[in-house]
Image: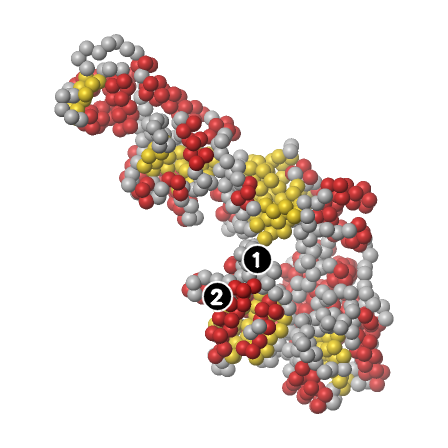
Amino acid sequence: MLSPKTRWSVGSPDPAYVRELSERFGIRPLLAALLAARGHTAEEAAFFLSDEFTFHDPSLLAGMSEAAERIRRAIRDRDKILIYGDYDADGVSSTSLLVRLFRMLEAEFDYRVPHRLRDGYGLHTHYLEEASRDGVKLVVTVDTGITAVEQAAAARRLGLDLIVTDHHEPPETLPDALAVVNPKREDCAYPFKGLAGVGVAFKLAHALLGRVPEELAAWAALGTIADVMPLVGENRSIVKLGLRQLRNEPPIGFAALFRVAGVERQEVSSNTIGFGLAPRINAAGRLADADEAVKLLIADDPVEADAIARRMDALNRERQRMVEEAAAEAIELVERDGGPGDGIVVASDRWNPGIIGIVASRLVEAYYRPTVVIAMDAESGVGKGSARAIPGFHLYDALKTCESLFLHFGGHASAAGLSIRGDNLDAFVEAFRNEASSRLTEELKTPVTLVDAELDLSDITIDAIQELEKLAPYGMGHPAPKFSISQAIVGEATVIGKDKRHAKFRLEGSGNKIEAVGFGIGETVRRVALGSRLSLVGELSVNEWNGRKTPQIIVKDVAVPHIQLFDWRSAATASAFRERWEAARSDDWRPAFLLGPYDEPPAALAAWWKTVPVYRLTTEGDRVVVPVNVNAFDAPFEGATDLWFVNCPFPFERFHLILKQDVSLCRTYALALDGAPTIDRETMKRAYVCMRELGESPEEDWIGAVARRVGLGLEAARLAIRVFRELGFVEEGGAPGTVRIARSPAKRDLSESASFAMALRAETARQEWKRMTTETLQARLLAQAPFRRDDIELRKTEAVG
């Protein structure tokens, strides 16, 4: 058995509706099942399957008409405009988009992006004062400003017109600006609320041009993906349009980023933008000056663009190093504090404020709890924090309850930023943890993997996988499809990669064989036995190697819902034996050895054997197992998760009683270690001769002497004496505890002894054990092993989209 790391919420699309979608749109059942599982109506399915774009009228955005009119007047009157952005990838993209737009409109303008370390987040009054001195008449914010109430008042005092365009959660009191454009305003009737900051800037361009600004879609797509906005509704159209531009004719700055990131433009996708381009854009704002990133995205000179892109690539590598160090320290702080609890708050004056958002995400991945990471400034005593949430926990609402402790905060449901004085830190830690405890249920604290549908291996073909691309681009709110497979036979399991961190499985079933690859889960290979029935969750892809295409599963989580058998009969040397035992114990498993009724510990392991829990399978009586050494009492058999068979666990019916009673058993291991020989007729003759020579003696002396002289193990010697006692050849001696040869025993055959007949059967089984194929061994050994599907908590739902 192997438990999954998450709960799987598996969609169960209506087969009739799947057929209906498949026939109506001429698509394969796999794609139809995906659409049905996500709860899409036929009309919605048509939108996803079409190549059309949907863009709403920008005038539906509250404040947009006023904003567009003022900008047109500024262009007409040659009023100087200041574009004011933010230092993350969304803000940089928004700023760059308006720069390109205002160039097209021949406006007189400048732009400003605050410095993360010197300025911090938001619109700053000193920049407004600087703008006023420079003759600026109009300030247009992008991806910021929704909480800038004081700064808006300052702009009025300075005689500046202010237009705020933003997408963050609005406060109760909006800035007193000429226009505030934010789809999340309560009084805004715009039909799509999920725009990124750059999406709002894109709609401003839409309003000013009177058409969809297709030539600016690349910037809009970058910011939308980088800010992890839901790729549904209008965002889907923005990103599709942007990807088309990037694949056909990428702007100069984007082309330079592709080169340093090693991205071919034909391969550009939401993934390559999210994991290739966005981190490099963000690196500039995190460690240096985001103005560098803006210069790259608005560049017209390829030489200049290449130089900037290389600098940003170097910054990104430095950012990665800093994140690794800070994340390790943050985890150490969490553990030192007794674990994550229901909410995590960690702070240090050794962390760069530019990386704490990534560190917060790392802690969420590690502990699955809402997390706030704060970089303290030792001189000012002020900390800058970045927060990340888990699904179902509304971060902005939770932080709002602590608002009195902050100098500033803002954000949305899943991410937020804040600043706080050091003397308020302890109070915030307590308040945030209490808030997290009040909001989090046990269900919310357990990671869930949303699975679109369950597939059979026969459903997975190259054509079906390629057809899923009709629903791309995938991203937040519209994730790449995940499917589950149940009870696929593991034909091969190997570790791959230079550092052996990845796993590869060959799965077999329904007459099909599929390769499954799991990145970063190499340790899983030793936990999955060949021949096991593997259940998994994964994404489908097409692997191309040497011109040959094959279907492939990218594994996200695995489970084995039954007791497994690891067949190590051919490789169970003493050293391998101990090495594998220690590996199992290091995983916090509870291993125990099981000897057959006549097995003896191998000589090479005799000393070590006394240090581990060992049990013997009995052949009679009420007890199924008995402890062999004192260590067994410290590790009760009922708690064993791993059972190691030195040899055949004969008789099978006794072992099957263990399978029925022991609820903790997850894995079994078949070994074939040579111990002391068991008995046969020739051995019994030699044992009888030895007994005659010994004369009347204590029984334990007989057992030891017979074992030494005949070359038997103690159990076999004890068995020999029991056989001759059953046949009447051995009787009790005159003194208590002694035995002797009977004076005139009746002539009887060894086969008349029940113990000898049982021993012969055991030896036959032992030899058969060595010869059996793995498949036969599994059938014999685990014929009555429980299949506990409920343990992997598969939850059927009507739709998980």
- Circle 1: residue type: Leu
Q: Is residue 227 left or right of residue 422?
A: right
Say whether disc 1 or disc 2 marks the residue closer to the N-terminus. 2
Furthest toward the top, the residue is: 747
**Type of the residue with mark 2:** Ala
Residue 330's label in the rendered image is: 2
> Circle 1 is placed at which residue position?
444
The reply to whether residue 539 is in sight is: no
Disc 1, disc 2: CB below 8 Å? no
Residue drawn at x 33%, y 14% as measured from the top left: 751
Q: Residue furthest left?
A: 735
Camera-nearest residue between 133 and 255: 133
Its colouring scheme is: secondary structure
Could you tell whether 236 is left or right of 594 in the image? right
Give the x, y percent position of residue 342. Answer: 51, 62
Seen in the picture, residue 673 relative to 100 is either above or below; the reply is above
Q: How many marks?
A: 2
Circle 1 crowding by C-alpha within 10 Å: few under 14, some 14–19, many from 20: some
Q: Nearer the viewer, mark 1 or mark 2?
A: 1
Frontmost residue, 510 versus 310: 510
Image point 65% across, 43% down: which residue? 454
Q: CA distance from mark 1 to mark 2?
A: 23 Å
Quadrant location of residue 32? top right
In the image, residue 470 above or below residue 76:
above
- Residue 597: x and y in percent read 34, 28
